Image (cartoon, grey):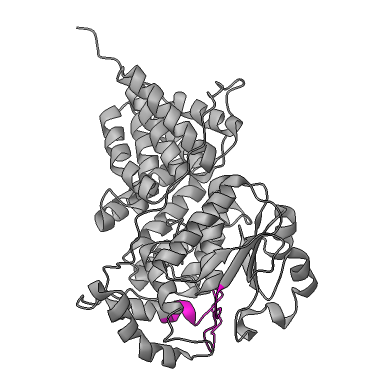
Amino acid sequence: MSARGLWLAVAALGALASCDIPAPPPEPEPVVPQPMRMFDNPSPNTVVRRANSDIAREFLDLSFALENGRRLKSMTRFEGPIAIKFAGSAPSYAERDLERLIARLRTEARIDIRRVPAEEPANIVVEAVAPSQMAQVAPSAACFVVPNATGWEDFRRNKRSIRTDWAQITERSSVAIFLPNNVPPQEIRDCLHEEIAQALGPLNDLFQLRDSIFNDDNFNLVLQPFDMLVLRIYYSPALRNGMTRAQVSERLPALLAKFNPAGSGLASDARPRTGRDWIRQIEIALGRSGSTQRRINAATRAIEIADTRGYSDQRIGFSFLARARVSTQSNPEQAALDYATAYSIFYTLFGADDIHTAQTAVQMAWLALSAGAVDDALVFINGSIPAARRGQDAIMLFNLLALKAQAESWRGNTARAKELRAEALSWGKYGLLSDRDLSRRMGQIAQLAPPPSEPES
């Protein structure tokens, strides 16, 4: 394939990964409507095969600071049974995802939580709000959680009061979660997992965590075994409201030995804490404001900081991935190198069957198909589909299955290609919702160059 063809493929591919879809053909092929698929709950599992000493440190860092770096003097949580509800009516798929999350919290984290009808009082209220309203108070947040609020109007009246300041509360009694009212089912599900986890437990995020939703890199979309272990410890009778970091630290070894015996005999692999300067550069790079060049410069600076600080884990790969996403349109050559570098880092660290590797495998498969390297594309795709299913990422699954359908079509496996497209579209309904958006994406993939024909003898 020519260099120009490679870079054009990267440009289209970067748009696919970022959901910034370029203009489709004038009349994209309509998709055949498919029923929406949803994920079942995974088998209960709170085993975390990492050293308990490392988990203890991470628990403390999560529980005694806010995302902005402010320190918390003491831990807070709900006491007694916890009631949660949607404010008003909710789509059936949102209700189903909330019920599944509650079942997991009860089974895996052993938290006494239940859903109540909208007309009953609740400790946690989930309310859908217009994105324009949310942007006025939290312009960079997809969804967010606040204490001592019973709903959007209550929050708006008191948003500058100390009562909505997490650092000022001594016990959790009422919390409100706000999410946008016009997003696909998967985004609602993601918000439910992340914000309910923070409403219940730790308020901080740690970029050094590979296996947690308490991480703003958005690789893990649903609560992981690590997260359930953290929440189970958080609601252990051995802990209580008002305990200091030192007091909690004293109790963690026994709690971890009891709840995670698999980590008792493992050697420490403590990762360096993430500096605020690296976080700031990532926020600029992936933010919605600022020029493209400023965002590229920020991503480059994040790579430099990660290298200097020894972030030899997913953070260095994420830094390259961030620069690839930002520079796809303006510098596709650099984007191609950065996607490949990120894939190599994740593959080396975690292997093919991992959600981090799968994030970049989509791009690598696209590139391979654009070059007519069908077999290579299928290696990337087949290695990543299990991770996408396990990670419950319907958008990634849609992309992988749609690309695989194209590859099988080129191989002449028409029936298999049709079957894969139908499955891709059913996951796309959950991840993207709009048939028009699905049609546009399918049209993009259909426009990839077919594999070169064999030369005539």
- From the top left corner, tell me how far across and down residue 243 is, in percent: 49, 90
Q: Residue at x 42, y 46 (%)?
A: 334
Point out the stretch of residues depicted in magenta.
Answer: 60-81
Count of residue discs: 0
Quarter assignment of residue 438: top right
In the current view of this chain or complex, which residue is farthest to the right?
Answer: 157
Is residue 67 within the magenta segment? yes
* Nearest the eye: 136 or 287: 136
Is residue 7 within the magenta segment? no
Q: Residue at x 74, y 61 (%)?
A: 136
Q: Residue at x 70, y 53 (%)?
A: 131
* Nearest the eye: 349 or 242: 242
Residue 7 drawn above or below residue 249: above
- Asked if residue 61 lies left or right of residue 136, the reply is left
- From the top left corner, tell me how far across and down residue 71 is, in percent: 53, 84
* Nearest the eye: 391 or 241: 241
- From the top left corner, tell me how far across and down residue 206 is, in percent: 44, 70
Residue 456 drawn above or below residue 351: above
Q: Residue at x 52, y 62 (%)?
A: 194
Q: Quadrant of the N terminus?
A: top left
* Nearest the eye: 117 or 398: 117
In the current view of this chain or complex, which residue is farthest to the top?
Answer: 457
Quarter assignment of residue 53: bottom left
Q: Is residue 329 visible?
A: no
Q: Is residue 418 visible?
A: yes
- From the top left corner, tell me how far across and down residue 417 is, in percent: 37, 23
Magenta stretch, main secondary structure, is loop
Quarter assignment of residue 424: top left
Q: Quadrant of the C terminus?
A: top left
